[in-house]
Image (spheres, helix red, strand yellow):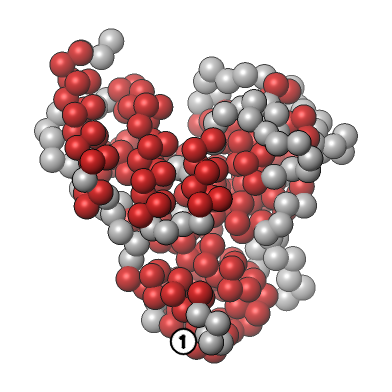
């Protein structure tokens, strides 16, 4: 049972953040520089590689990412220029954004840190499942699915920023309730502030609406919703979820990809846990 006065305080604090976007984190300077370079038609592979080389961690991540199953490389690229040639400017942008998210939320309060770790783990699991599904189901570009999946969870992380200035941090149950009420709004505001493609911002708006889907082939929202379903199932096996077969995204899967195991999950996912674990390690 959540005390009414406490919940009212939390809502007031979050509303204040929603009304003053200065409290929300901005993208790192290196991320902004890379995105600006990618949008410049005069940028070459060499000049982009030089810019990225200023961040050793990002450099290493890109090289490692290019060797992942998403890009199906015969041999691992050895240089950053080779990586950029393989994954393209759009792929670089997606991976850079995914990397940036991990550095945006610096949490010192141990109680808030615990909540952050729970949310971050779900974000990483969801991103890894998205990457696997996109690869297996033929959605291209697969790295867009992974990055969008990570971005669709930033609202749950941003929510924690609202509690930095208060002493009475919400417990886990209350935090999840607040997430259901506010995380989408915070996510949309944050991604809009970062000038993320409106198409991807809409994914955040509709993520988790299990019955929402357009006619035709599998789309990005379908991949994200299938990933969210399985991430929640992984983190909370007893969570109140509809049967997988009721998801609009599931109904788009062909006979070769819609097989389920005894736990009600896609066999495609449960039989590729090693690949997902490798992706989780990459994202962490």
Q: State the residue in front, 253 or 171.
A: 253
Residue 209: x, y in percent?
Answer: 57, 29
| Residue at the extreme right of the image, as rendered | 255
* Left or right relative to 240: residue 57: left
Number of marks: 1
Q: As displayed, is residue 89 above or below residue 44?
A: above
Residue 102: x, y in percent?
Answer: 39, 55
Quarter residue 228 falls in: top right
Q: State the residue in front, 12 or 108.
A: 12
- Residue 141 seen in render: yes
Q: As displayed, is residue 257 above or below residue 93?
A: above
Per the image, the residue denoted by label 1 is 50
Q: Give the residue at x 87% y 34%.
A: 255
Quadrant showing the N terminus: top left
Residue 54: x, y in percent?
Answer: 39, 81
- Residue 264 seen in render: no
Q: State the residue in front, 231 or 153.
A: 153
Q: Give the residue at x 73% y 23%.
A: 245
SS at mark 1 in the image: helix
Q: Give the residue at x 58% y 20%.
A: 241
Q: As displayed, is residue 91 above or below residue 273?
A: below
Q: Tag 1: Cα neighbours inside 10 Å, few (<14), some, or many (≥20)?
A: some
Residue 81: x, y in percent?
Answer: 59, 84
Q: Give the residue at x 18% y 42%.
A: 164
* Left or right relative to 4: residue 268: right
Quarter residue 238 falls in: top right
């Amino acid at each position: 049972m959540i005390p009414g006065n406490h919940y009212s305080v939390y809502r007031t604090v979050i509303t204040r953040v929603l009304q003053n976007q200065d409290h929300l984190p901005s993208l790192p300077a290196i991320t902004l520089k890379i995105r600006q370079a990618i949008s410049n038609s005069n940028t070459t592979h060499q000049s982009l590689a030089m810019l990225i080389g200023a961040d050793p961690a990002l450099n290493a991540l890109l090289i490692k990412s290019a060797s992942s199953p998403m890009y199906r490389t015969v041999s691992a690229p050895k240089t950053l220029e080779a990586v950029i040639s393989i994954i393209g400017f759009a792929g670089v942008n997606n991976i850079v954004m995914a990397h940036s998210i991990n550095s945006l939320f610096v949490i010192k309060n141990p109680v808030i840190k615990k909540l952050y770790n729970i949310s971050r783990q779900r974000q990483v699991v969801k991103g890894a499942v998205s990457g696997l599904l996109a690869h297996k189901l033929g959605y291209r570009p697969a790295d867009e699915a992974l990055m969008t999946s990570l971005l669709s969870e930033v609202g749950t992380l941003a929510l924690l920023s609202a509690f930095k200035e208060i002493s009475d941090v919400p417990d886990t149950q209350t935090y999840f309730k607040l997430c259901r009420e506010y995380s989408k709004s915070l996510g949309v505001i944050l991604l809009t502030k970062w000038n993320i493609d409106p198409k991807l911002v809409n994914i955040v708006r509709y993520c988790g609406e299990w019955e929402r889907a357009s006619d035709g082939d599998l789309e990005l929202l379908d991949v994200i919703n299938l990933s969210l379903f399985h991430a929640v199932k992984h983190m909370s096996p007893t969570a109140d979820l509809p049967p997988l077969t009721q998801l609009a995204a599931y109904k788009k899967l062909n006979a070769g990809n819609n097989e389920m195991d005894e736990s009600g999950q896609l066999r495609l996912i449960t039989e590729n846990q090693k690949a997902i674990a490798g992706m989780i390690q990459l994202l962490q």
